[in-house]
């Protein structure tokens, strides 16, 4: 099962909502609800299985929309808010920051900047994280590859990284004995 970030999309333009839904699917974001206005947003956020991301197009009346969603970022701190607007001035950006909004994208959307914002939000939920594979391959028996592999794994685990060590020498593998384990198989 693949984990996806759930999203509510608020945009008065139906064509924009459709296009943005298709774009977000490429980044592991599933749009569960589309709204033409911010009025129905509080009811959706109160649900126990509410969205993790809310994307709001502030246009055509940015200050009115900001007023409607104003208390929501502080009431629902586990939900990430991403706001978009054509009109960007410093006062509006400061107001949005004070509300607790984590991301703001200026319209028209730059795909690179929007993708970077979505990636930052995905990292909060662990979506899109790639595992790093380190292979220790011996050139000859007795060269110390098991010792190196065990020490690297122990060091990574001590640093807080989720670590898996797999000994692929199924006949004479020595990793279990290095960690004082007695494998059943």
Image (cartoon, rainbow, N blue to C red):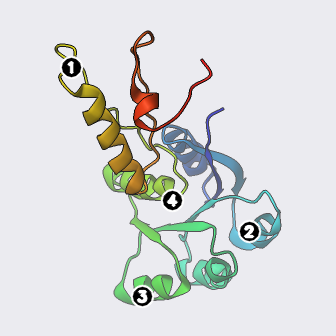
Q: Are marks 1 and 2 in contact (CB under 8 Å)?
A: no
Q: Are marks 1 and 4 in contact (CB under 8 Å)?
A: no
Which is more N-terminal, label 2 or label 3? 2
State the CA–CA distance, disc 1 to disc 2: 64 Å
Residue for badge 4: 124
Q: Position of residue 101 (x, y in %)?
A: 51, 76
Q: Secondary structure at mark 3?
A: helix
Nearer to us in this view, 44 or 174: 174
Q: Residue at x 61, y 35 (%)?
A: 2
State the CA–CA distance, disc 3 to disc 2: 22 Å
Q: Residue at x 62, y 22 (%)?
A: 184
Q: Residues within 10 Å of mark 4 (few under 14, many from 20)?
A: few
Residue for badge 3: 94
Seen as rendered, the residue at the extreme top is 171
Compared with 113, 103 (above or below) is below
State the CA–CA distance, disc 2 to disc 4: 22 Å
Q: Secondary structure at mark 4?
A: helix
* Residue 109 visible somewhere in the drawing: no
Q: Secondary structure at mark 2?
A: helix
Instruction: Identify the mark at residue 142; answer none if there is no mark.
Output: 1
């Amino acid at each position: 099962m693949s984990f996806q970030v759930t999203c509510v999309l608020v945009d008065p333009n139906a064509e924009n909502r459709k296009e943005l839904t298709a774009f977000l699917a490429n980044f592991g974001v599933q749009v569960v609800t589309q709204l033409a206005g911010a009025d129905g947003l509080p009811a959706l956020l109160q649900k126990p299985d509410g969205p993790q991301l809310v994307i709001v197009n502030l246009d055509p009346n940015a200050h009115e929309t900001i007023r409607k969603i104003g208390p929501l970022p502080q009431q629902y701190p586990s939900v990430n808010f991403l706001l978009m607007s054509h009109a960007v001035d410093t006062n509006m950006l400061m107001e949005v920051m004070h509300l607790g909004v984590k991301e703001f994208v200026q319209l028209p959307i730059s795909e690179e900047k929007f993708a970077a914002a979505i990636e930052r939000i995905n990292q909060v939920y662990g979506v899109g994280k790639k595992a790093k594979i380190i292979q220790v391959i011996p050139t000859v028996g007795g060269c110390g590859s098991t010792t190196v592999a065990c020490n690297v794994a122990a060091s990574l685990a001590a640093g807080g990284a989720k670590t898996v060590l797999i000994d692929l020498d199924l006949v004479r593998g020595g990793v279990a004995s290095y960690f004082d384990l007695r494998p059943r198989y």
